[in-house]
Image (cartoon, rainbow, N blue to C red):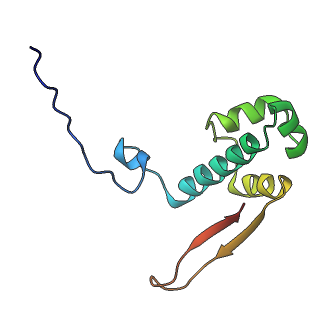
Amino acid sequence: MTAAKETLIVGSGKSVFEDIGIAMSPADMLKVNLAAFVSRIIQEKNMTQSAAAEVLGIDQPKVSKLLRGRLKDFSVERLLGYVLALGHEIDVNIGSDTKTKRNVKLVA
């Protein structure tokens, strides 16, 4: 008879990066979220990296870096341009107090 395995379930923090001890600024998180959105659009459209490169106006190796999360060479502004190039809208809400939501809504 084998012993039953115990499973330890640990609550998550605000993000996976926080959970593994990587400090992320709000700007870094915005880049990650934008890159994930762009990646999801490319996948949903079943685009090859070459086709995506043509639409985004970049070369295929840059698309590969983007899809693998290598975001060092990508600015928030550049990623926003990719969202627009892929045919989606961007709605930005900024508030002046802590009660107002500060978010970027990407319309799929």
Q: Is residue 12 above or below residue 5?
A: below
How many numbered discs, if any? 0
Q: Looking at the picture, how far across and down is residue 70, in whole percent? A: 63, 36
Depth check: 89 or 102 in front?
89
Depth check: 64 or 11 in front?
11
Left or right for 7, reference 48: left
Q: Looking at the picture, how far across and down is residue 48, in whole percent? A: 81, 32
Q: Is residue 107 above or below residue 99?
A: above
Task: Give me the residue at 85% from left, 54% from top.
Answer: 85
Please identify the residue farthest to the top as the structure is shown.
1
- Name the image quarter holding the N terminus: top left
Q: Is residue 80 above or below residue 7?
A: below
Task: Give me the residue at 64% from left, 41% from top.
Answer: 71
Q: Looking at the picture, how far across and down is residue 63, in whole percent? A: 76, 35
Q: Looking at the picture, how far across and down is residue 15, in whole percent? A: 42, 52
Left or right for 9, reference 24: left
- Rendering quarter of residue 52: top right
- Name the image quarter holding the C terminus: bottom right
Depth check: 98 or 108 in front?
108
Depth check: 87 or 18 in front?
87
- Rendering quarter of residue 91: bottom right
Task: Give me the residue at 16% from left, 31% from top.
Answer: 6
Task: Give me the residue at 20% from left, 38% from top.
Answer: 8
